[in-house]
């Protein structure tokens, strides 16, 4: 038997019974690397299903995930509450330092012992303000002063932290205290003084 005839017989054996419009399909085996990828995909999908859809005691099911998120949320809330308590204590320290600076830096000479104002400086205890209502406005006035009105700029005499502490003291302790001997209101009324933390 010639080699050509052997090849034709082998070719006929490899042809499957499928015949589409006279086109015959060869029955070739899949390459080994494709079979390996296919088997690895099946194995991976099994591990993935067990890992992410849960099996008893792996705590990956939906109920366990929900419980974990609730616990994480409660811990975050506890941390925020502890932080707020720390901020309250910190605020008290800032106000104490601001009060000390109010006295030491001579603010009382123009604004009075309680911020009530006198013949030189305006009242810092009411809701009427000459230079804006926000804490940023207070910081700007302390930093740059008002030389035309006789107020010295304090940017060279106090650090940024000290200026911030003094502004917090004014915002939190003086505004709204309205002492009996307060100077008459000047400037525009501020409905609510804005503070930044």
Image (cartoon, helix red, strand yellow):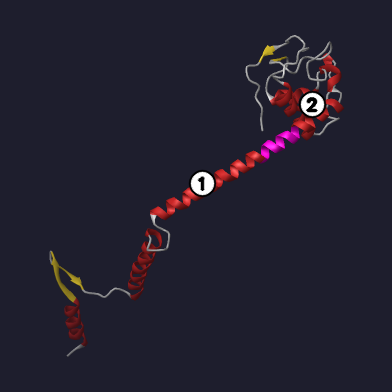
Q: Check if residue 28 falls in the magenta segment.
A: no
Along the polypeptide, which appears first: circle 2 or circle 1?
1
Quadrant of the rendering where the N terminus is positioned = bottom left
Q: Please identify the quarter of the rendering in which residue 141 is found.
A: top right
Q: Please identify the quarter of the rendering in which residue 111 is found.
A: top right
Disc marking residue 45: none
Element type at mark 2: helix
Question: Magenta: predominant secondary structure element?
Answer: helix
Residue receiving disc 2: 143
Highlighted magenta segment, given as a residue range: 86-94
Dot 2 alpha-carbon crowd within 10 angstroms: few under 14, some 14 to 19, many 20 or more: many
Quadrant of the rendering where the C terminus is positioned = top right
Q: Check if residue 93 falls in the magenta segment.
A: yes
Q: CA distance from mark 2 to mark 1?
A: 42 Å
Residue 46 vs 166, above or below: the answer is below
- Image point 82% across, 30% down: which residue? 100
x, y percent for residue 191: 62, 17
Please give left or right for residue 45 compared with residue 10 in the image: right
Please identify the residue farthest to the front as the structure is shown.
180
Please give left or right for residue 160 compared with residue 45 in the image: right
């Amino acid at each position: 038997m010639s080699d050509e005839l052997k090849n034709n017989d082998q070719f006929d054996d490899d042809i499957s019974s499928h015949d589409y419009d006279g086109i015959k399909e060869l029955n070739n085996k899949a390459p080994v690397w494709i079979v390996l990828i296919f088997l690895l995909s099946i194995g991976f999908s099994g591990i993935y299903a067990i890992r992410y859809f849960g099996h008893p005691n792996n705590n990956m099911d939906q109920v366990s995930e929900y419980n974990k998120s609730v616990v994480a949320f409660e811990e975050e809330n506890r941390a925020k509450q502890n932080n707020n308590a720390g901020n309250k204590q910190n605020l008290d320290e800032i106000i104490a330092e601001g009060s000390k600076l109010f006295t030491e830096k001579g603010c009382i000479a123009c604004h009075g012992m309680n911020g009530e104002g006198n013949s030189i400086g305006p009242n810092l205890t009411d809701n009427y303000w000459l230079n804006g209502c926000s804490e940023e406005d207070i910081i700007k006035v302390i930093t740059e002063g008002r030389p035309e009105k006789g107020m010295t700029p304090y940017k060279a005499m106090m650090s940024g932290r000290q200026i911030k502490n003094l502004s917090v003291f004014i915002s939190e302790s003086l505004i709204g205290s309205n002492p009996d001997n307060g100077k008459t209101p000047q400037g525009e009324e501020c409905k609510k003084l804005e503070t930044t933390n």
